[in-house]
Amino acid sequence: MFSSNRSLAIFLFTSLFCLYSLVIDDSLLAGERILIKAHIETGYQKNTNFYKSNINTKSVDTHNLKSGIKLGYTTAKSTVSLDYWFNILRYNDQNQVPAGQIKANAFDYTEQMTAFTAQSQISDRLLVRLDNLHWKTRDPAKADINSNEVDRFKYSINKFTPTINYTFGEKFIIGLKYTNLYTNYFDDGAGQGEDSTENRKTSTLWYNFNQKSSFNLDYQHWTRDYDKTTSNYTSNQTMVNVYHQFNYFKFSAGAGYHTRDFDQTISGGNIDKFIWELSLTARNPSYSIKPPKSRIFIGLGSNLNDSSSGGIYYTASWLKAKFTYLILEKINCQVTTYYQTADYETSTRKDDRWLISGGADYLITDFFTLRLVGGIEDRDSNQASKDFTNKFVILKLSYKLGSK
């Protein structure tokens, strides 16, 4: 957990920042805007392989009730927002569970997310921003964007990020960012996840060629310290990125190098990797309406995973894509695909994992939406015990209400 002094410092910094953002210029209040949005959702999901296991293939029904609120206050130069929701999840086995085995309802819990943002354009050149994200979950993907895990350990993360951007000249921007990420597993038993603290410093130099094209040089240095036996490490990552927009399309490409040095000797030793990312997004129409007539996202890349227990690291190479298309102004069709190869640095293990799903949102009214999604997820490993296949179907009904 955070020490009391650190928690107090973060609280005071956040409070002062919010106060400063709101009173920085009283003359701006004529352009103020207040945002209040609330939502509630109820849903059902069926998984044919709830545990994503090669041998323990149990069919489980999931029922959820999710509710939240988003608050925002905006002036001509400042913004403050708070987004909170909770999701009550209950699991039921479809078949009789043999004596001595864990029932699915042992994993019942309430997921929670709180996101706070405050931003102020202090001068024409200086922008200051503060973000804090807190998440309690059983989803391993929240701990690492390149996760290859299937466990359901309950944990929380807290991500605290102050940022400063300074514009100089007509085309240059320099950004400085610090991130403190704390991961806390609720069950500290052996093999139940390991608490860790990451401290990351990021500096980015932007150059804007024109309104549609830009370039940046991004450098990140971070350390991750584990509470138990997993080796701490230090990472250094440098990337060059370019961005371009044409008509409805936005394109980005980046390449760089990532080095990771460990405090202890681990299998395979220190890691050095060429890393890269590509993405293409398109939206028609390009201006903001919800939902758009059509939308496309395609992303590819390769990098190391960051979070581990027991010093297990791998190179993740991925392809992600999502396509949506609005029919008759009421039915928003969606197709999502995901593919990732995890090539382990500390062993000979190699996994290919993919997911494909399709469905649609039926926009009943401006406030009510009915969603139906079905899909399949699969992992094929050169270690047969790591294979799994899971088919799923999701049905959700949501209600949203907002005012400005």
Image (spheres, helix red, strand yellow):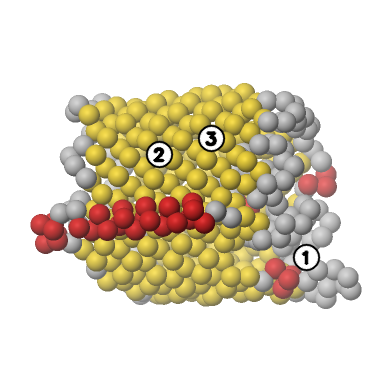
Direction from residue 29 to residue 395 in the image, left or right = right
Label 3 CA crowd tier, 10 Å (few <14, some 14–19, many 20+): some
Going by the numbered disc 1, the residue's amino acid type is Lys
Corner quadrant of residue 226: top right
Return the residue nearer the eye: 32 or 364. Answer: 32
| Image mark for residue 222 | 3
Label 2 CA crowd tier, 10 Å (few <14, some 14–19, many 20+): some
Direction from residue 215 to residue 187 in the image, left or right = right
Q: Residue at x 33, y 40 (%)?
A: 164
- Under circle 2, the secondary element is strand
Direction from residue 27 to residue 245 in the image, left or right = right
On the image, numbered disc 1 is attached to which residue? 58
- On screen, 280 above or below 82? above
Corner quadrant of residue 229: top right
- Under circle 1, the secondary element is loop
- On screen, 371 above or below 13? below
- On screen, 384 above or below 370? above
Direction from residue 349 to residue 251 in the image, left or right = left
Could you tell me which quadrant the C terminus lies in?
A: bottom left
Could you tell me which quadrant the N terminus lies in?
A: bottom right
- Under circle 3, the secondary element is strand
Return the residue nearer the eye: 93 or 291. Answer: 93
The spot of residue 117 in percent (x, y) is 36, 55
